[in-house]
């Protein structure tokens, strides 16, 4: 378990684990690597639904991550009850993600469940789903993830 190993741990969560949460995971992994803290963290992402399990991130998200040099190989998975004791922080992208997480959160949960956007210095709590949007929407998600993940890392 991450908490028992002395590592800090965070799970980024969105609906299907192919757009927002993979970007957040890649951004945060890049940030802790830059600070020389990669060995101090367990970082992952997941979705509240199983639609995309086994698939790589959306191609537009992958292109955005590559453009910014934060690309990370990822395969979509669904949140499990075990995640609520494995991870110290479970950070959702929008209020529906949080509602879905609270619905499956087991009684023995030790995780802090909150919006990643609660760390946004500009106060924009929700990271909107870019799936039905354009490349610029993925860029917006990336920029917001950089701001939020930087603030989260500074806070913990």
Image (cartoon, helix red, strand yellow):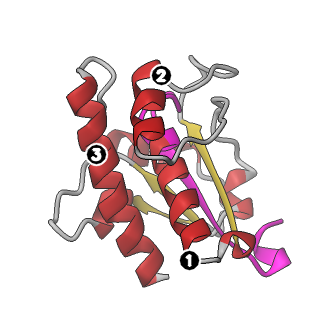
Instruction: Say if 127 sits above or below 8 in the image.
Output: above
Q: Residue 144, position in %: x, y?
A: 28, 53
Q: Residue 87, position in %: x, y?
A: 67, 63
Q: Nearer the viewer, residue 79 or 156?
A: 156
Q: Residue 147, position in %: x, y?
A: 30, 63
* Magenta run includes residue 56: no
| Crowding near the residue tagged with mark 1, few <14, some 14–19, many ≥20 C-alpha atoms within 10 Å | few
Q: Secondary structure at mark 1?
A: loop
For label 3, the residue is: 127
For label 2, the residue is: 58
The tag earlier along the polypeptide, 1 or 2, is 1
Look at 34% across and 45% down and name the residue there.
Answer: 142
Q: Nearer the viewer, residue 105 or 111?
A: 111
* Quarter residue 89 falls in: bottom right
For label 1, the residue is: 35
The tag earlier along the polypeptide, 3 or 2, is 2
The mark closer to the camera, 1 or 3, is 1
Instruction: Say if 60 sits above or below 36 in the image.
Output: above
Q: Residue 40, position in %: x, y?
A: 71, 76
| Residue 127 seen | yes
Q: Secondary structure at mark 3?
A: loop
The mark closer to the camera, 1 or 2, is 1
Image quarter (top left, top right, bottom left or bottom right) of the N terminus: bottom right
Q: Magenta part of the protein: which range?
A: 1-22
């Amino acid at each position: 378990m991450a908490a028992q190993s002395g590592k800090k741990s965070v799970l980024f969560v969105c609906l299907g684990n192919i757009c927002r949460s993979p970007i957040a995971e890649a951004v945060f992994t890049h940030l802790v690597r830059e600070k020389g803290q990669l060995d101090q963290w367990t970082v992952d992402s997941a979705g509240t639904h199983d639609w995309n399990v086994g698939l790589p991130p959306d191609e537009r998200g992958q292109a955005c991550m590559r453009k910014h040099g934060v690309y990370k190989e990822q395969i979509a998975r669904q949140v499990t009850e075990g995640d609520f004791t494995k991870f110290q922080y479970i950070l959702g992208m929008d209020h529906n993600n949080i509602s879905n997480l609270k619905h499956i959160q087991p009684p023995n949960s030790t995780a802090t469940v909150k919006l990643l956007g609660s760390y946004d210095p500009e106060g924009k709590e929700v990271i909107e789903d870019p799936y039905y949007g354009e490349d610029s929407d993925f860029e917006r998600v990336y920029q917001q993830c950089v701001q939020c993940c930087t603030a989260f890392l500074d806070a913990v």
